[in-house]
Amino acid sequence: DTGVSQDPRHKITKRGQNVTFRCDPISEHNRLYWYRQTLGQGPEFLTYFQNEAQLEKSRLLSDRFSAERPKGSFSTLEIQRTEQGDSAMYLCASGLDRSSGNTIYFGEGSWLTVV
Amino acid sequence: SQQGEEDPQALSIQEGENATMNCSYKTSINNLQWYRQNSGRGLVHLILIRSNEREKHSGRLRVTLDTSKKSSSLLITASRAADTASYFCATDDGGLTGGGNKLTFGTGTQLKVEL
């Protein structure tokens, strides 16, 4: 069990460019989450997958953001036409069935800097 | 949006002292969890307390939950320099208030333990 892995760890991009982050959850976990965290704040929920189905999306997830989990394993988060306000750490987390208490396990995050 | 608010925002103590952090939240919950985050890293799950529990222990951690006051506290006893980190509470409403399957995080307490 290698934990949740995220790639890339750091990304600097110019405003207007598209970026994509990848998350590989813990292998037996069927739930996958994306959160965003800015400096001095707690993680803010973006979206949630149960297997390959995207079941919930935050209002924070504007139409420039899209997330997929095509085979119920890894997930990608794409941000189109990046803006400076998108600069943040993007955290992926995974978990087992809710009956286990909804504990989720985070990756190390992907830092995005939009210049 | 953040569900919980931690208090204090920052706490500085000497090694060996106890550290107490408080969390207040707004809606009914299924369980409440505490997570720890070292600077620039992902979050690590510490402890989960269910809504029908009042107190839980794990090693040097003690968590209390008062659902009537919608508050929780995290006590770290005999603190060590390695405990220096940010601590977040996270609430799971179990879908009771339309929160879906996500955890909603507070704003965090920054703990610094000095030698």
Image (tube, rainbow, N blue to C red):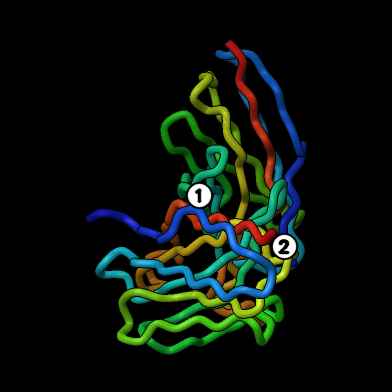
Residue visible at 67% across and 35% down in the picture = B110
For the view shown, which residue lies furthest in the left direction?
A: A1
Q: Residue A115 carries which label?
A: none
Asked if residue B113 lies left or right of residue A1, the reply is right
Q: Where is residue B96 in the image (x, y as percent from the top left)?
A: 62, 79
Q: Mark 2 lies on which chain?
A: B
| Tag 2: amino acid | Gln
* Disc 2 secondary structure class: loop
| Disc 1 packing (10 Å; few <14; some 14–19; many ≥20) | many
Q: In this view, does A63 lie to the left or right of A92?
A: right
Residue beneath the point at 51% across and 19% down? B80
Q: Tell me if residue B74 comes above or below residue A112 in the rendering.
A: above
Q: Mark 1 lies on which chain?
A: B
Towards the viewer: A23 or A44: A23
The percent position of residue B43, horizontal first and vertical second, equals 50, 49
In the rendered image, the quadrant that contains the N terminus of chain B is bottom right
Give the CA separation, mark 1 to mark 2: 17 Å
Q: Which mark is residue B3?
A: 2
Viewer-side label of 1, 2: 1
Which quadrant of the figure has residue B37?
top right
Say few, some or many: other residues with alpha carbon within 10 Å of mark 2 (under 14 / 14 to 19 / 20 or more): many
Q: Can you tell which mark lies on residue B43? A: 1
Does the image show residue B49? Answer: yes
Q: Image quadrant of residue B2? A: bottom right
Dot 1 or dot 2: first in sequence order is 2
Which residue is farthest top? B115
Q: In which quarter of the image is the C terminus of chain B?
A: top right
Asked whether residue B52 appears in the rendered view, the answer is: no
Disc 1 residue type? Leu
x then y, percent, for residue A115: 69, 59
Q: In this view, does A23 lie above or below A56?
A: above
- Residue A93 position in % (x across, y down): 45, 63
